[in-house]
Amino acid sequence: MVVEALSSTADLADAREKLVQSFAGLDDALLDLPDVVGRWSIRQTLAHLLGWDAWGVMAIVALERGREVAEPDDDAMNRDWLRRTRSLSGAELQRLLRASRREMLDLLAAMPDEVRSQPRYDLGGAMLSPDEFVDGFIDHDTEHASEIRAWRKARGNA
């Protein structure tokens, strides 16, 4: 159904923008304070999300070609993406987060709506449509954006 497909794409973009706004305007030094999301800093949280985005883009490409996809080693992926983002400013992180989400949105936009709504991705025995697959990314962004906003509010940085 067209409405569902368009809604999923809009929700995917909206969730990312809410994440970006959750840390917008913070001094860069605050990005590395611990205990924002569990024990993680904002930077660690964003690196984690960027790692999942990179995996998600790779997974969509592979699944569209009929290949199998294994879940990544979360700890190794987090370390790798933290290394990649360690020296980036808040503004640079915002650009990278938007660009990584744009990649995923572009892949979805290239699919006809009826293809995006059909369960055809086999992920560990669960059959998901491309739209259902990206629901996890929407939820993930929303969860961590909410945690960052709560931390800011508790510190008086809302």
Image (cartoon, rainbow, N blue to C red):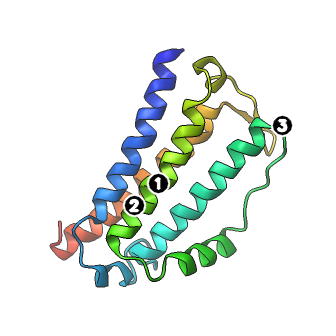
At horizontal 66% and vertical 68% (from top left) the residue drawn is 74
Q: Which residue has dot 3 on it?
A: 66
Residue 143 located left or right of residue 115: left
Q: Are marks 3 and 1 in contact (CB under 8 Å)?
A: no
Residue, disc 2: 95
User: Which residue matches tag 1?
Assistant: 99
Mark 1 crowdedness (10 Å alpha carbons): few <14, some 14-19, many ≥20: few
- Identified by mark 3, the residue type is Gly
**Residue type at tag 1:** Ala
Q: Are marks 1 and 2 in contact (CB under 8 Å)?
A: yes
Q: Secondary structure at mark 3?
A: loop
Residue 32 lies in what quarter of the image?
Answer: bottom left
10 Å neighbourhood of mark 3: few (<14), some, or many (≥20)? few
Which of disc 2 and disc 3 is earlier in sequence? 3
Q: Is there any visible trace of residue 135 in the rendered image?
A: no
Q: Nearer the viewer, residue 13 or 132?
A: 13
Q: Which mark is residue 43?
A: none
Q: Residues within 10 Å of mark 2 (few under 14, many from 20)?
A: few
Q: In which quadrant will I find the N terminus?
A: top right
Q: CA distance from mark 3 to mark 1?
A: 26 Å
